[in-house]
Amino acid sequence: MRIVSRAWPVDDVDPEAPVIDNARRVLAVRIAEFYSFEPVVPHPELSEALHDMRISAKRLRYSLELFRPQFEKPGERQIERVRTIQEILGTLHDHDVRVDLIGDELSQLMLEQSRKTRSDIADASPEELATIAAVALRPPPDDPRRGLIALLGREHASRRTAYARFRELWDTYAADGMRRDLVALSVRPLPDGHAARATTVA
Amino acid sequence: MTSDFPQPVAAAIDIGSNSIKMTIGRANGEGGIDQLDWASEVVRLGHGLDQTGLLDDERIQIAIETLTRFAAQARERGATRVVAVATEATRAAANGATFLDRVREETGIEVRVVDGQAEAALTFRGLGADADLTDSVLVADIGGGSTELITARDGAMLAARSLPLGSGRLTDRFIVADPPCLDELAACETAAAASIQAAQPIRLPTSSALRLIVVGGTGEFMARLVPDDQHIDLAAVRLVLAKLATLSAAELADEIDIPEARARVLPAGVAIVAAIASSLDPERIEISRSGIRAGLLLEAIYGGVTDEEESKTKGGPAEKWSRKDGSLATDQRESSGLNFRDTMSELIAERWQTVLTAIPIALAGTDIEGVHDVRVASRRLRAVMDVAAPAFPGKWYKALHRTAKEITGALGEVRDRDVLLEALQADRSAAPLAEHPGIDRLIDRVERERVAARAEMEHYLRRLLDGSLRSELTRRFGVTEAPTSRSTGAPTECAS
C-alpha cells in the first residue's frame, strides 16, 4: 500500500482570524501529516513512500518558515531538524532515481545485445559460432555493461549508507523529543493580550 | 551643559540588505549623542535573495570581513559597547541564523535581528534627535530590502508599516541597463506604488500639511542631485529620476561621491521615494541623516525606551506587519488584529511575483540554477497556496493553485536531468577507463531526455506567459509584471 503524498487539508482555517491562530492549526496538521509516514521509516525498500515522506517534510518546513516569527526561537531548531531530515531523504531519493535509471539502461543494453547475439548466431557459419559464444560469455574491455554494472553496485552501496544515516538521524531526533517539541510549538500559549481572542476562535 | 565626567562611547552597526554601516558616538551629557566616527561598506548582502531565498556565501564572507574591520575600528575609538542589528535580508534568508552564528563566532559581535516594528521604533527614536517631528510627518526609511513607513503627529508615533520594497530588491528585479532605462525606473515606481496600495491603508495623521522625511542613504544621496536652492517635492524627485536615466553607475558614483555598487541601486531607491510621494501626497519632502543607528546608540548608551518614548511609539492602534519573503506578522501583540486572508493574499502576490521574475532566467537557459530557482519559488508559492486555500473558495483560486503545481512539474523533468548529469559527470571522472563506455551511454541518454524535457518546459512556460496568467494575477492579487529585459542577465544599454 502506498501512502499518498498529497497535502493534508487544513479544514479549520479561519480567514478572519489572526495569523497566529491559523499558524498553529496549519502546523498541527503538517506535523500529523509528516508523522503519518513514521511506519515507513524502518522500511528502506519503500522508496516511493520515503520520497513522499520527504515531500511532506518539505511542506512541514515551509510552514515553519512561513510562520517563523510566530514560532520564534523554538521554531528555528525545528526548522533545522526538519531540513536535515528532508535533505537526507532527498539524497536517498537521488540514489533511487539513479538505481532505476541504471537498471533500466542495463536491461535495454542486455536486450539489445541478446538480440544481436541471436541474430549473429542465426547468420553464422558453424565455424563462427565458437567466436560468437566466446564474445557473449566474456564481454570485451569496452563493453558498456562493465561501467553500468559497477555504477549500479556503487549506487546501491551509497543508498544503503544514506538510509543508515537517515535511520540514525531519525532515531537521534526521536530520542531528543523532536515530535514533542514540534507539538509543543503548535500548542504554544499565545502572547499576552492575545488569549481572549484565541479562546473565542477556538 | 556637557558633563565633566568621561562619557560612555558605543558603536552601533546596522546590517542592511545593501550596506553595513556603523556610527560611533559618545553620550553628550544632555541625553543626546555626539558622533565620533562612522564607517560604511556596500556589501549587497541581500543580492539574489529573492531568487534563492539564501544569503550568498561570498556576500556572507565579505560581510564578516567588514564587521571584523568595524569591530577593530570601534575598539580603537574607545567604544565599550558594540550593538548591532540586522534587518530585512537577514530576517528573510533561510540561512540568516547560520550567518549570525558565524558573525558571533568570528567577530564576537552579537547581532540582534529586528522585525519591522522594532526597526521602525529604533529609527523613530534616532530621528527624534535630529529632525523636526512637530505637526504631521510620514517617515520613510528606504533600505535595500524593505521600506519602513512611520506616521507620527507632534513627535508621537501613530503607526508603522514594513513593506517589502528596497532599492536593492527592485534593482535585482527590474533594472538591467546601465544607465537604467526610463521604463525600468517606471517599472520600479509602479511596483512600489502597487505594493503601497495593496497594503492596508496607511493611517495618515489628519492634517493638510504632511511632511515626508526620507531617512537613510537613498534620501541623502538623492538630495545631492537636487540643486541647492531648490526645495524637494515630487517634481524634483522626478527630475532626479530623469537625470539618473542618463548616468551610468560609474558616472553617478563619481558625481555624488559614493561607491559604484551603491550608485547602482540608488535609482530604484529614488523610484520608491517617487512612489511614496505620489501615493501619499506630502506637501514637502525632507531628508534626515539620522535613523536606526542613532536610535541604537541612544538605546545602548541611555538604555531602552523611556516611558515617555514608549507612550509615543505605542500611540497608534495595532498595525499590520507582513514580511513577504518567508514569514508573517512579526510582533504578535501588535498583530493580534491581523486578518489571515489579507495577509495570505499579499504573500501569494509576492510569491507569484518571484516565480514570474525567475521564469525568464530559466527560459534563457544560461544558468542551470535558473530552473531550480523557479522550482523552489513555485514550491514556496504552493506552500502558501495550500495553507490559504480555505480563505479563497473560488474556482479561480483552484485554477491558479493548479497552475502553480503544473509549473513545479514542468520544471521537474529538466531539473532531475540536470542533477543526474552532474552526478554522472562526477562518477565518470572518478571511474576507471573501462567503465567509461557504460557511463557515457547513460550520459547520452540523459542528455537526450533533457533536451526533450527542456523543449516541453519551454513550450509550457511560454504558453503560460503569453496566456492570461499575468492579468489574472494582477486582477486577483495585484501582482505587477517584471520587464522582460530582466532575462538578459548582464547590464545592457537602453534601447533608444
Image (tube, coloured by chain):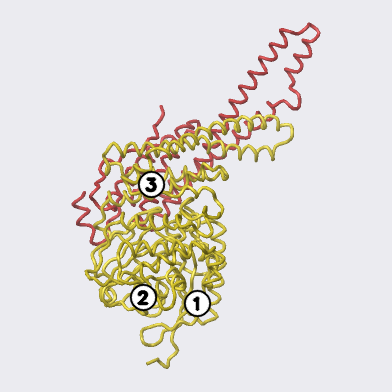
Chain colours: A red, B yellow
- Residue B199: horizontal and vertical position, in percent? 30, 56
* Kind of residue at badge 1: Trp
* Kind of residue at badge 2: Leu
Q: Which residue is mark 3?
A: A179
Q: Residue at x 29, y 46 (%)?
A: A25
Q: Residue at x 72, y 11 (%)?
A: A120
* Kind of residue at badge 3: Arg
- Residue B456: horizontal and vertical position, in percent? 50, 32
Question: Which chain is disc 3 placed on?
Answer: A
**Sequence-wise first label, 1 or 2:** 1
Labels 3 and 2 positioned on one and the same chain: no
| Other-residue count near label 2 (Cα within 10 Å), few / some / many at <14 / 14–19 / ≥20 | many
For the residue pair B320 and A139, the one nearer the viewer reads as B320
Q: Can see residue B422?
A: yes
Q: Which residue is mark 1?
A: B38
Front disc: 3 or 1: 1
Q: Residue at x 48, y 59 (%)?
A: B46
* Looking at the image, residue B98 lies above or below residue B377: below
* Looking at the image, residue B191 lies above or below residue B363: below
In the picture provided, is A195 more to the left or to the right than A4? Answer: left
Q: Quote the CA–CA distance across marks 1 and 2.
A: 17 Å
Front disc: 3 or 2: 2
Q: Quote the CA–CA distance across marks 3 and 2.
A: 46 Å
| Other-residue count near label 1 (Cα within 10 Å), few / some / many at <14 / 14–19 / ≥20 | some
Q: Can see residue A163?
A: no
Question: Quick one: SS at disc 3?
Answer: helix
Q: Which residue is mark 2?
A: B127
Question: Which chain is disc 1 placed on?
Answer: B
Q: Quote the CA–CA distance across marks 3 and 1.
A: 48 Å
For the residue pair B323 and B263, the one nearer the viewer reads as B263
- Residue B369: horizontal and vertical position, in percent? 54, 45
Which residue ends up furthest to the front in the rendered image?
B496
